[in-house]
Amino acid sequence: MDLTKIIARAKSILLTPKTEWPVIANETDTVAGLYTGYILVMAAIPALIRFLSSTIIGVSVPFFGTYHVGFGDGLTFAITGYVFSLVGIFVMALIVDALAPTFSGQKSQVQALKAVTYAYTAFWVASIIGIVPGLAIVAALAGLVYGIYLLRLGLPATMKCPDDKAVGYTVASIIAAIVVSVILSLVVGALVGPKLPLGRGSLSLTHQGSGFSDGSAGAALQKWAQSMQAASEKVQAAQKSGDTAAQANAVGQAVSAALGGGGKVESLPPDTIKQFVPESLAGLPRTNVSVERNAAMGMQVSTARASYSDGAQRSLNLEITDTGSLKGLVGFATGFAGIEQDKETDSGYEKVYRSGGQLVHEQWNNGSRSGEYSVVVGDRFAVKVSGSAADISELKAAVGSVNLAGLEALKGSGVQAN
């Protein structure tokens, strides 16, 4: 990782893009090489700025003063944004590559990643301006506009599309990327939630030779980049074969690798996951149940929901989610949960911790005598019970009455190795 080279490339693509893009297009590189040699460093800039501006400098709130985000929350949000930006870059590269034939371009995963990566440089560098209070939005807009301009200049060089089709190619890529980003944010937000627990020392930047120390977030990201390289090679091989089915399967596995899955995963069929929804919960009869399996871009997620009520004051809701192809991302999130989070207020409390190797979240409101208790089983299945109860122990017991061992036994079900 040569910082001098990274800075020189960023300067060249921003100041002299018309002459720099042909140079970039002719360079021999790999997906893993682009990540470890440029993306991992540059994508960290907005994450660092976000952390400093929210925790150290603070956010100015009109009429109320300056609000400082807690160190733990600030670090959590910064790292969450960093990880998801790495995923988003690869997904957008897949889109750019898939659209190439439509605009008379040549498909190439590496060249598509080059186009997206160096177009993103404008946003990464512009984010530095965001450290000045009140200029974050201006910086984001400036980076977005110039980034689109860079992508429009870069597509003819990297993807070999005619210059007169570059504008349409750029617009189609941006629109598709926005749609995918929104969907990905909603899915990940629903599964992981706004808080991504991070353990003390999980962000270790200690080097051993040319790599990150074992067990660190950097090592995990390096391994992730390598899995994407392997997945991209399979996509290229499938493209050369001309087999449409093989191409679709390879792209699905590549997206799964981008999300940390290590392979394409078929989530549990509705009939299977429904078997884990009991007829009664904490002495309450089941009043309704619904099960569904949704798929998009080769990824699957299955969810079972049920309500339980005595017809009077007591009611509970059960939700079981099989994260399917997103299990790798969930595993990454839970893997660094070594620190116990414990927040208490006059109205109740919230905790995030690990118990028996499982990630646990519990929340309780003293006033309404209600809360929720959830556990992640096998880094794949999320089981949550919420509603009214005498205390949190009732919700915990309700989750415990679900066949968690049976779910964990299925953590490898439907997994197809890359």
Image (tube, helix red, strand yellow):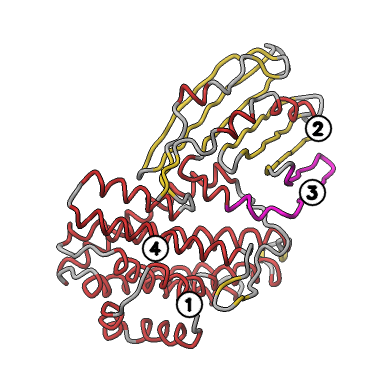
Instruction: From this view, report whether residue 210 is shown above or below residue 284.
Output: below
Q: Inspect this view and state whether residue 64 appears.
A: no
Give the residue at x 53% y 63%.
221
**Under tag 1, what secondary structure?**
helix
Looking at the image, is mark 4 or mark 1 nearer the viewer? 4
Q: Earlier in the sequence, mark 2 or mark 4?
A: 4
Give the residue at x 21% y 61%.
100
- Asked if residue 345 lies in the magenta stretch, the reply is yes
**Under tag 3, what secondary structure?**
strand
Tell me the quarter of the picture where residue 153 sits.
Answer: bottom left
Span shown in magenta: 332-355
- Rounded to the nearest whole Å, what is the CA distance between mark 3 and mark 2? 16 Å
Give 379 or 114, whichever is nearer the viewer: 379
Q: Circle 4 is placed at which residue position? A: 229
Q: Position of residue 144 (x, y in %)?
A: 40, 68
Q: Circle 2 is placed at which residue position? A: 367
Q: Earlier in the sequence, mark 3 or mark 2?
A: 3
Instruction: From this view, report whether residue 46 is shown above or below residue 415.
Output: below
Q: Earlier in the sequence, mark 2 or mark 1?
A: 1
Confirm or deny contact between disc 4 and disc 3 (CB under 8 A). no
- Rounded to the nearest whole Å, what is the CA distance between mark 2 and mark 4? 52 Å
Left or right of 236 on screen, residue 57: right
Q: Inspect this view and state whether residue 201 appears.
A: yes
Tell me the quarter of the picture where residue 239 sits.
Answer: bottom left
Numbered label attached to residue 343: 3
Q: Circle 1 is placed at which residue position? A: 125
Q: Position of residue 207 (x, y in %)?
A: 62, 76
Mark 2: amino acid: Gly
- Mark 3 crowdedness (10 Å alpha carbons): few <14, some 14-19, many ≥20: few
- Rounded to the nearest whole Å, what is the CA distance between mark 4 and mark 3? 41 Å
Confirm or deny contact between disc 3 and disc 2 (CB under 8 A). no
- Rounded to the nearest whole Å, what is the CA distance between mark 4 and mark 1? 26 Å
